[in-house]
Image (tube, rainbow, N blue to C red):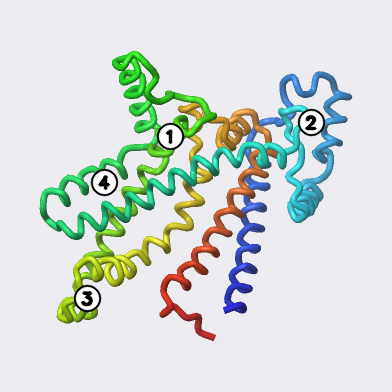
Amino acid sequence: MLTYFAKRIALGLVTIWFIASATFFGMHAVPGDPLAGDKAMTAQIRANLEAKYGLDKPLGSQYLIYLGNIARGDFGISYTQENRRVNDIIREHFPISATLGILAIVFAGLGGVLWGALTALYRNRWPDVVIMFLVILGISVPSFVVAAISQWSLVGANLAAGTTILPIGGWGTVWHMLVPALVLGLSTMAYLTRLMRSSMLEVVSTDYIRTAKAKGLPATQIFSRHQLRNAILPVVTVLGPAIAGITTGGFVVEIVFAIPGLGRYFVQAIQQLDYTVIMGTTVFYGAFLVFMVILVDLVYGLIDPRVRVEK
């Protein structure tokens, strides 16, 4: 098992190197000047800025410097935010995105397992039909549309009540998190519901379930100890990438609800051609995704003792 995870970590490091390299050369292939506009008022100021950021060196030298900095965990200094390091931006704003993402994955995971199990138990009856219709809507409608409709609905509800039931934007309390977290986790919840439903229907028809019923075990015990535990394994498999995707992918939701998370700064960096912020956050997101995938492999083996790694 230790050898297996050592190989996975090695492959994860190679994946992070590939992400970092692709991001570096992709950003340098994008048309535009990162020092254009008010950043370089004179030729001397421009030369000083190029020397500071290493832009006066050949591309190969810049790449080696970039890899060396990444290996030390140094993502550089922002081009647009004066004297602000990319590491500081990530450290200050990623916890906000992570908090929102964790709450969203809790909603998505609990909702996906609950609704998926419910649709399997009431297969082809009205609860199954209604929930699956909502699941299709959740998968099909983009998150920015759901975010805009949710915010519009909150405005109407607050006006009708004559008071603020829930804030329509901002950050600071748990009430600010509820609606953005629901919007962020909605599509993942819909996907997990479909996955849980199909897994439950597959487990119900297995021999050990029929044996448990023949032994006269209570329905609740069969459901919790046999059906649910085995049906949830495929959900756990996709939960790692889902956690990483939700935690780092709430760009639109953060902008619509005015949440000062890392995604907001990532979008601003793209608009302003802030190379260091774009490359640093992309590598950070990629490393986080790789870590979550490896973690899910470990959790999968703990949940299902039958999982063994062959030599």
In the image, 49 versus 90, the foreground residue is 90
Element at badge 1? helix
Element at badge 3? helix
Give above or below for 131 relative to 256. below
Element at badge 4? helix
C-beta proximity under 8 Å, tags 1 and 4: no
Disc nearer the start of the sequence (1/4): 4
Residue designated by label 3:
209
**Alpha carbons under labels 1 and 2: distance apart:** 32 Å
Residue designated by label 1:
180
Residue designated by label 4:
135
Element at badge 2? loop
- The kind of residue on which mark 2 rests is Asn
Q: Nearer the viewer, mark 2 or mark 3?
A: 3
- The kind of residue on which mark 3 rests is Ile
C-beta proximity under 8 Å, tags 3 and 1: no
In the image, 250 versus 266, the foreground residue is 250
Residue designated by label 2:
83
**Alpha carbons under labels 2 and 4: distance apart:** 47 Å
What is the crowding at mark 1: few (fewer than 14 residues within 10 Å), some, or many (at least 20)?
many
Q: Nearer the viewer, mark 1 or mark 2?
A: 1
**Alpha carbons under labels 1 and 4: distance apart:** 18 Å
Give above or below for 143 relative to 225. above
